[in-house]
């Protein structure tokens, strides 16, 4: 079983992914960390040198590689759903969970993080709203499960994800 977490930056994908992997005894992998490891550089540097397109190319390669592993919880970057190839490979190789959060919550959770190149601007709220308007429909299209994270403790979110996955598995096995 693979579980892939999608959603905007600040939704809690890394935190919830770690907890979920511990609870289910699966390996946790963060696609952004894997990109940095493989590149030998951090994401802001990759954006500076290669631009967003270069970063997205690296991201697509990492997601294609990681998604074929077995027994992982994968936290993806907020923009991973932009590419058709990423959406397809995630849907094909596991259960996709959309961690849905508000722009206000994103602002609160990302305000002090300098490792987010797209938010290094005078108006990060406007950037987040624009990103959400483009990405939200893609998150919905890709997701098997949608969980709201606003104002919720990560362990509560993990419990809900597990409950929904079990419920979905029961439904699917009943259809056989």
Image (cartoon, rainbow, N blue to C red):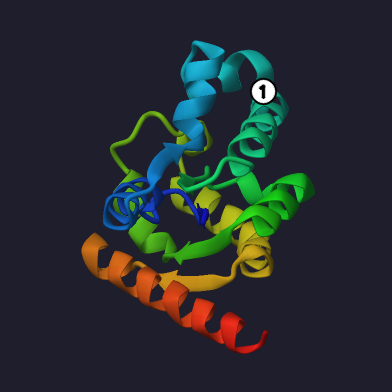
Q: Residue furthest right?
A: 84
How many labels were placed on the picture?
1
Q: Position of residue 123 (x, y in %)?
A: 47, 45
What residue does disc 1 label?
A: 51
Query: Picture quarter containing residue 138?
Result: bottom right
- Residue found 38% across the figure and 48% down from its top: 26
Query: Picture quarter containing residue 114?
Result: top left
Q: Secondary structure at mark 1?
A: helix
Q: Residues within 10 Å of mark 1 (few under 14, many from 20)?
A: few
Q: Is residue 47 left or right of residue 125?
A: right
Q: Is 70 or 5 nearer to us in this picture?
A: 70
Q: Is 122 or 11 nearer to us in this picture?
A: 11
Query: Picture quarter containing residue 67?
Result: top right
- Residue found 67% across the figure and 67% down from its top: 137
Q: Position of residue 110 (x, y in %)?
A: 35, 44
Q: Is residue 136 left or right of residue 22?
A: right
Q: Position of residue 165 (x, y in %)?
A: 46, 72
If the image is split into quadrants, where does the C terminus sit?
A: bottom right
Above/below status of 144 relative to 127: below
Above/below status of 69 relative to 176: above
Q: Is 25 or 59 nearer to us in this picture?
A: 25
Q: Position of residue 164 (x, y in %)?
A: 43, 77
- Residue found 69% across the figure and 68% down from its top: 141
Q: Is residue 57 left or right of residue 13?
A: right
- Residue found 50% across the figure and 83% down from its top: 170
């Amino acid at each position: 079983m693979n579980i892939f977490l999608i959603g905007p930056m600040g939704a809690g994908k890394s935190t919830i992914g770690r907890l979920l992997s511990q609870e289910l005894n699966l390996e946790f992998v963060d696609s952004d960390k894997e990109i940095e490891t493989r590149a030998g550089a951090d994401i802001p540097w990759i954006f500076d040198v290669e631009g967003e397109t270069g970063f997205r190319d690296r991201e697509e390669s990492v997601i294609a590689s990681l998604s074929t592993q077995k027994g992982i919880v994968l936290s993806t970057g907020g923009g991973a759903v932009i590419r058709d190839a990423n959406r397809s490979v995630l849907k094909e190789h596991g259960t996709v969970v959309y961690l849905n959060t508000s722009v206000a919550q994103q602002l609160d959770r990302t305000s002090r993080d300098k490792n987010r190149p797209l938010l290094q601007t005078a108006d990060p709220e406007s950037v987040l709203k624009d990103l959400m308007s483009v990405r939200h429909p893609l998150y919905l299209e890709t997701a098997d499960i949608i969980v709201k994270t606003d104002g919720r403790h990560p362990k509560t979110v993990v419990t809900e994800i597990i409950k929904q996955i079990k419920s979905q598995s029961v439904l699917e096995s009943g259809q056989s």
